[in-house]
Every structure is written in C-alpha cells, then in structure tokens.
Image (cartoon, helix red, strand yellow):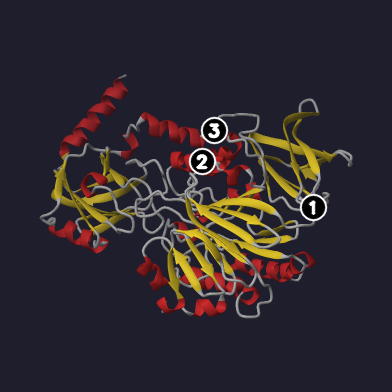
Amino acid sequence: MKKAVFIFAALCLALFNLHAAPWQIYVASKLSPEDARKISVSGVMPPQSKKVEIKPGAIFHLSKISGKIKRGTPLRSIAYTTITSAKDEEKFIGIGADWYFTCFVNGKKVLSTEPGGNEFFQISCYNHIGKVKLKKGVNHVTLFIRPQVYQWKFAFKIMPDLKMLPLRRSDRDRMISQMFPPANPGLLRKELLHQLSTDSAAISCEFGVPTICGIRFRSASTPEKLLWNTVSGKRTVRKIHRFILSDLKPATAYSYEIVKLDTNTAGIIPVSSGKFTTAPETGVRHRFIAIGDTQVSPDDRKKAISSMLKLPEGKNADFFVSLGDVAETFVTFAPHYFDSFLNILHKNKFFKPVMLVKGNHEYRGNETEVYNDHFGRSYYTFRYGEVFYIVLDTGEGADTLWLPGNHLLWTDTTQLFEEQVKFLERVISSPACQNAKYRIVIAHASPFKYHAPFYAQSIRKLTEKFFFGTDPRCKIDLWLCGHVHYVSRFDPVTDTAYFSGITKLKAKHFRKEDFSEINFSVITNDGPGQGQKRLSVTAVEVTPEGLAVKIMTPDGKVIDESFIRKGKPHEVKSSKLYKLERKHFK
C-alpha cells in the first residue's frame, strides 16, 4: 500500500512540473511533414486552425474538424500543442494515429510511422512510445497526420516515467493476452481446407499448445490413411500443422479427421472432422467468388464477408478467393486473418476450399512469417476441370528501406522472385497448363505499369517473359487482382479500360505501351481509401463459351457485368464504370 501511494505521489509531482496546453488543429489537402516541422520551430499555426481541448491519452477524431471525408480528397492535418517544462529534461511521449503520423518537437523529428502506418488497429497513446528532450520553458509539439482507411483519429500523452506508468486495464490485458495466451489444448478454430485441386488438397489447423497432430482420410473406394506431421521422420510437436493430401482421385468425395497423439497414454484422440470433394478432371463449368484489400475495421470486414456469402454468387461458389491485403498490418496475425476474416466463412457455413493470395501488406507486421506456416508456399497452381490457375506472390510494394525499425528493413523478395521464375518455367511447360482450355492468373498486384515503379518493375521481371507480348509463351485469359483500391476492367481486344473513381487520375497512371504488351483481360477489385470503406466482390462463372464476370458491392449492387470470350470484345451487360480508350492515355 505504501509503495502504491509513493508511485501515485511521484506521478503527481512529475505531472505538476509538466504542463500541456490545448491543441490547435489545421486540416488541408496540401500539407506536408515539412510544414509541421516548421511550425514546431515557430509555434505559429495558420489562422484557420481550430482550438480543441483533448484530455491526455484521449482519442480525438479529426473528422470533427474536417467533416466527412469525400472520396478522392487527399486530406492532411497538423495538430499543435505546447509542453511547458520547469527544467531541461528527457521525457517519454506516447502516440497512436490512424493511420500515419510524424511528430516533431522543437524542430526535431522524434517519432514517425511513415511509410508503414500505425500497425496497431486499436489506436492508443501506448502504440508508439519515444523519448524526447524538453528544454526549460515552452516546447512546441506538432503531429503531421494523414488518414488511410479507418476513422482518422489520434491519441497523445506525456508519460512522466515509463517505468512507473500504470497502463490502462484494456491495454494491460491486451498485452498480457498476447504475451501469455490461454493454454487451450484443443484446436483454436475450425481447420482450413485450401489449395484444392483435381488430385490434392491442403488442410491446416492450429492448437493452443504444442501438439503432435495427424490426419486420417479416406474415400468410399479407398482405405483409410493416417498421415502425421513429421520432420525428418520425427513427429513434430508444434501449434500450427499443415497437411498435403496427395494422390487423390478427381471428382471424389473424401472424409477426414484431425487427430492428436496423447503422449501420456499413446492414444490417438480425434479433435475435428470434415469432408470435401476434389475438383473434376474434365469440363470447365464452375464458379468462384473473390474479395481483396479488406483493410477496413474488423467489424466492417466481418460484415462484408458475411454479406457476400449470402449472395447467390456466394452460396453457389465452388471456392473462395482472397486477393490479399486482408488487413493493413499484422502485428498479431490471428485476430486479423482468422478472427475477422477466415473464421467468418465457417460461421456462415461456408466450408468449401479457399484459395489465398499473399498481398504486400501480408509482409508488414511482427507476425507475417506465420502466413507460410498456416498456408504453405505463397505461390502455387491448381486445376479445376480443364481450367488451369496460377497463383502468384507479387511481393512487397516498395524496396527495402534501410531505416532502423521500419518494416521494409525486413523485406527482401529477391530470392522469392528467382524461385517463382523457375517455378513458372516448369509450370508453363506442364501438360496441365498447355492442355488447359482456360488459364487464369490470380495475384495481388496488377500487371500494368501505372502503379509504383518498384512494384511494376518487380512484377514485370517475374512475369513478362511468360505472359506478355503479342506471342507470349503462355497465353492467359484473365488476370484477376486487387491492390490499387479501385474497380477496373481491361478489354485487350478493343484497347479499352473501364474504371471507377476519378478518370483523370487513372488516365495519368496508364501507359500506352501496356496496350500492346498486355493481350489478356484484367479485372481489378476495389479497396478502401481516403477514409472510404468501399469494397467490391468479383464473381466469376467459367463456362464452355467464356467467362461471366460480375463485380458487385458486398451486398450485391452490381458495379460492372460482362462476358469475356476468347479473342472477342467484352460483352458488357451493365456498367457504372468510366470508359477510357487508348487515345486517353499517355
């Protein structure tokens, strides 16, 4: 009790010696970090700025100043306050912001989340903590803040002594749960069926504690087989397990059972079961539904997935495709990728196969490595009848950034791309690819050059010698992707692009050489941006005559509907997209 009183008194004394003034907020479309730095030197804000009272650590919504953010409007803000100190000293400050911020104190940058973003979805003044040097007297503090997807807000707090800081219960409980997860000996969630093809399927699962795990499976005409997860002949004890069921028969129903080994009794204990049917070997008719760039709040993500699965296109889909960028970042993997995404499929009784694409944001955060533990190699192929699918990993959207602590410091896709090139060499020469009636590439990034130069160059190095040009080594019928956060459809026969959003902006991004180099259809899925939560769903029905493509909102409002035949112009049934022809581009 005496110790608690002492800590409380020390905190009060420290707070008495530091005084933070009210905030001034200025919102405009053409602000930069340099503007914020200059204000942190002069202490002079623009006359249009508004004064607001913000309690230490409280979350302030900048939309109270800006109003509703209009689609396509690149708003920025500078938040300014002063800290009065009784002496020269070093102190800690804590900041969280949706989604990017840079903090300056007396002209010096002290904290920044550029270019990776806040990383923590739950905005809190405990997200990012840094040490600052305060001078005796008045210290000028500015925050340059720009939004990305969510609600555009920030929190700031002076922390008298980090060692004595009493964290809020919610923050403390969250940190403890991450550091010491509950010891649940069973499965944490329903196992996942993915990468299903004509002769194989993958099933992954996760336990709460390290476990020896196996899978039993059989069909009506084949005997039961027990497969353990082993490494070099030893049954491995781990939380995450992934099984490849191979040498299966096409168009055949299989049942399976996840089991664990009780090392105390040497008994085999069933923990979950399910069933699936392998893809047919002949024919082309099937359906799938795809969504990507679901970088909205977890609740909005759950709502979008649930809504799309209630559509006829969702109910009748033979498999589900994620086009990548499930969330903005993966400080913790399971809450984003499972709790608010894949688990929602199962809650809506969708137990069909999922085909997962790794986006550039799956490279960002502390737990990105577990992606491959759950889902295996991030590039692969699968067949559904006489349709051959190639799934690519287009990597990170930016080059390695040599800054301490930045997420791009951990990214190097050089070897990954070299491996994929060798993989594509084998794939396009395979009978399954050469004899296919349709070939479809599924990737996160677009094949066009209009986006970030590094990303475009990386994708061209990976795919150009296989798919591009008037006489490519592998003729594909469709490239389905996301990443750019707007809907588009490219018709290679008429050299016509259809876009949602601001047409002039999109026209600037296109290059005329794309029209001669890209001779396959391209469909791009929507994603949120500039404070908007817009998402789109792409439903594809493969038929002997061609590809029926419908792009919708998650609740079923049609954005664009077309039919794609080999070598023919797209047959547009309905469209709300802007039409741009080759003459409109540079």
**Residue 4's image quarter?**
top left
Q: Is residue 274 left or right of residue 558?
A: right
> Which residue: 69% across, 52% down?
286
Find residue 330 and name its label: none
| SS for dot 2 | helix
The C terminus: image quadrant: bottom left
Residue 326 in the image: above or below residue 429: above
Helix, strand or loop at mark 1 = loop
The mark found on residue 181 in the picture is: 3
Of pointers 1 and 2, the one earlier in the residue sequence: 1
Spatial separation of the CA atoms under disc 3 and disc 2? 31 Å
Residue 307 numbered tag = 2
CB atoms at circles 3 and 2 under 8 Å apart?
Answer: no
- Mark 3: which secondary structure? loop
Q: Is residue 84 in view from this perspective? A: no
Q: Is 428 above or below relative to 305? A: below
- Whether residue 233 sits left or right of residue 484 in the image: it is right
Name the amino acid, label 2. Answer: Ser
Name the residue: 30% across, 58% down: 73
Q: Quadrant of the N terminus?
A: top left
CA–CA distance in space, label 1 to label 2: 32 Å
Report crowding for label 2: few under 14, some 14 to 19, many 20 or more residues within 10 A (C-alpha): some
- Identify the residue at horizontal 52%, vertical 77% (top origin): 515
Do we see residue 428 in this rendering? yes
Q: Which residue is mark 1?
A: 199
Q: Which residue is nearer to you in this view: 42 or 30?
A: 30
Q: Considering depth in this image, is 465 or 556 the residue closer to the camera? A: 556
3 vs 1, front mark: 1
